[in-house]
């Protein structure tokens, strides 16, 4: 009993921290989603009115569609780019490790600096359009067009976060025994066949880890669209995290903002459970 009490004493600070600064606010937000609260008067219970009104709100529907599209596109492209970068820097050529270090520097840059730099690069007269001009590309309004604003945000997201997951894949590739590739070479397996039969199955756990974390990261991203486009044009890049901020702090509708946050939490939870179930099924197979 004495040892157990000492153990409880050691973990109690961490438990109190999570209770007051994480799970407590989460429970409070869930309760607020069933109330009408403007931060000036006490919360008033309204049941599911906040959720019912969201279903008929075109701004919420547009933000939900933007969020889902952003999650899918950024997750797939981050995973693909990270894997291709890992395969490139894992080749036994001089300077590969130096290139990996240089690529990873994009991940340690402050997110605000990244957003501001890309905002200037994607300006109609910015460097990106100037580099594309010799190839016959005209003026592209990357951040002010409905068709290019969200792809531009996805591109910046991939550029920012793919190097982090590249390191995960590099570690996974380095852990594959070289004997497998030597045996494949003796059997005549080359290139894509060797990747499909050896590399991909052995890095599958890391692949699912990257997909899950990238999806969670994309679902809760706020600063990237907020700074680069401000949610425009016409709400084309407004995601649920931005809508939560605008509803709660610009319009003082904290109950409605809490309801949107519950919807976002449900999306993240559903994605995580689906990916975990898929991963466990592949592990059992």
Image (spheres, rainbow, N blue to C red):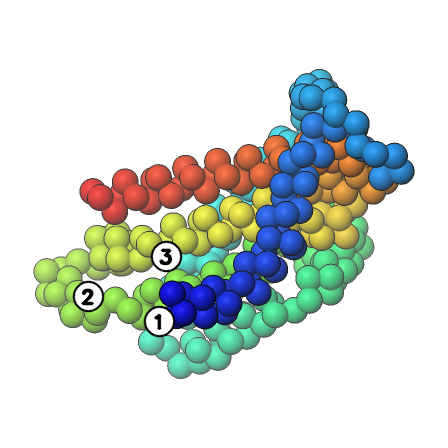
Marks 1 and 2 sit apart, C-alpha to C-alpha, by 13 Å
Q: Earlier in the sequence, mark 1 or mark 3?
A: 1
Residue under label 1, please give it: 91
**Residue 264 point in image, percent of width and height:** 61, 37
Q: Is residue 86 visible?
A: no
User: Which residue: 42% across, 39% down?
Assistant: 273
Q: Earlier in the sequence, mark 3 or mark 2?
A: 2
SS class of the residue under badge 3? Answer: helix
**Residue 2 point in image, percent of width and height:** 40, 69
The foreground one among 200 and 40 is: 40
Q: Quadrant of residue 170?
A: bottom left
Quadrant where the N terminus is found in the figure: bottom left
Image marks 1 and 2: residues in contact by CB distance under 8 Å = no
Circle nearer the viewer, 3 or 2:
3
Going by the picture, which residue comes out furthest to the left? Answer: 187
Residue under label 3, please give it: 206
Q: Earlier in the sequence, mark 1 or mark 2?
A: 1
Residue under label 2, please give it: 181
């Amino acid at each position: 009993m004495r040892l157990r009490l000492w153990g409880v004493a050691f973990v109690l600070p961490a438990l109190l921290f999570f209770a007051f600064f994480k799970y407590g606010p989460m429970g409070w937000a869930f309760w607020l989603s069933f109330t009408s609260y403007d931060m000036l008067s006490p919360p008033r219970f309204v049941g599911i009115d906040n959720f019912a009104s969201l279903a008929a709100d075109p701004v919420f529907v547009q933000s939900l569609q933007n969020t889902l599209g952003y999650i899918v596109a950024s997750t797939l492209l981050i995973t693909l780019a990270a894997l291709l970068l890992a395969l490139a820097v894992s080749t036994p050529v001089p300077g590969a490790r130096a290139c990996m270090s240089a690529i990873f520097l994009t991940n340690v840059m402050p997110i605000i600096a990244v957003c501001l730099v890309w905002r200037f690069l994607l300006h109609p007269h910015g460097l990106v359009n100037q580099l594309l001009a010799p190839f016959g590309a005209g003026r592209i309004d990357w951040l002010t067009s409905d068709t290019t604003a969200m792809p531009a945000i996805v591109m910046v997201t991939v550029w920012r976060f793919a190097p982090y997951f590249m390191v995960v894949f590099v570690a996974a590739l380095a852990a594959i025994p070289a004997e497998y590739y030597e045996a494949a070479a003796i059997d005549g397996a080359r290139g894509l066949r060797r990747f499909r039969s050896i590399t991909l199955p052995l890095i599958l756990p890391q692949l699912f880890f990257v997909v899950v974390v990238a999806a969670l990261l994309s679902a809760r991203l706020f600063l990237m669209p907020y700074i680069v486009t401000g949610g425009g044009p016409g709400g084309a890049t407004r995601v649920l995290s931005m809508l939560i901020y605008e509803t709660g702090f610009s319009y003082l509708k904290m109950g409605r903002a809490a309801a949107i946050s519950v919807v976002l939490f449900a999306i993240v939870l559903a994605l995580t459970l689906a990916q975990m179930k898929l991963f466990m099924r592949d592990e059992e197979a």
